[in-house]
Image (cartoon, rainbow, N blue to C red):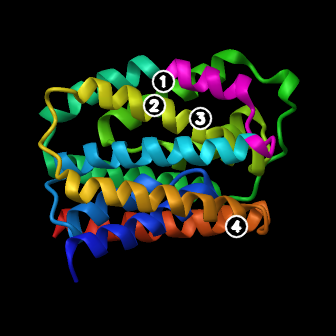
Amino acid sequence: MSGLVLALLAGGVIGVALGALGGGGSVLAVPALVYLLGFAPAAATTASLVIVAFTSATALVAHARSGAVRWRGGMLFAAAGLVPSALGGALTAHLPAGLLTVAFALVAGLAAHRMLRPSATRRAESTVRASRVAASGAGLGAVTGVLGVGGGFLAVPALVNVVGLRMRDAVGTSLLVITVNSLAALAARAGTSAHLDWAVVAPFTGAAILGAWDGRRLAGRVSGDTLRRVFAWALLAMAALMLVDALA
């Protein structure tokens, strides 16, 4: 199967995941770029940021039109993550590829575990402390910068557990956080990142953007609990595969 066809298929699947779940796209993008399309790990993490930034921005528009984006909490998350994301982007070039892969798998597994736990009583938004939101946003930004992921797989549970958003609103708001963090990480990597094969990255991104629209429609037909479980099990499977590969 040609690289172009693989890029289109993988991009479509990742777009659906990102549009429906508000995250997880880059968790799938990085291994797809490495194992299916032959990208080096450094180039794959940078390419995934390009793909996820454009795709999440597209999905954000659809979620915003339906009123599923909480702009105040999302902007605080995004602003808090800008500097950590930029610093992480500069740091990642100096870390071994194996260490990055293991860290990637462990973070994804931790996020999946949190999503599968029974939900605690939702915190009333009026009592949410800005300091906790800012701290969570900074942590997400750092993960984005170092691991080259949008951070949605951590943003969704953080927005649910820290800010107290409903799952539907957390999915939409996470797309705002993903877009801003991805762009900040890309800016930090400018001039230092590996060469990207745009003949693969461009169609991959285009297919992901189209898939995100279908994912958004899927989100409107499936319950929040079902989305959360699908999200968590997909993360666990991907984390296990990457951990096995890194340690083999």
Q: Disc 3 and disc 1: Cα gap in Å?
A: 12 Å
Mark 2 lies on a secondary structure that is: helix
| Residue 105 appears anywhere in the view | yes
* Residue range (magenta): 65-81
Q: Position of residue 18 (x, y in %)?
A: 54, 56
Q: Circle 2 is placed at which residue position?
A: 181
Relative placement, left or right, of 233 versus 171 is left
Q: In percent of the image, x 40 and y 62: which residue is there?
A: 28
Q: Which residue is mark 4?
A: 218
Say which element carries label 3. helix
- On residue 176, the disc is 3
- Residue that label 1 marks: 81
Mark 4 vs 3, N-terminal side: 3
Of the two numbered discs 2 and 4 on the same chain, state the one appearing first in sequence. Answer: 2
Sequence-earlier tag: 2 or 1: 1
Q: Position of residue 33 (x, y in %)?
A: 26, 61
Locate the N terminus by quadrant: bottom left
Whether tag 2 and tag 3 are in contact, CB under 8 A, the answer is: no
Q: How many numbered circles does the render carry? A: 4
Point out the frontmost of discs 2 and 1. 2
Q: Earlier in the sequence, mark 3 or mark 1?
A: 1
| Three-letter amino acid code of the residue under disc 3 | Leu
Q: What amino acid is found at the position of numbered circle 4 in the picture?
A: Leu
Q: Is label 2 or label 4 in front?
A: 4
| Sooner in the amino-acid sequence: mark 1 or mark 4 | 1
Q: Are marks 2 and 1 in contact (CB under 8 Å)?
A: yes
The amino acid at mark 1 is Gly
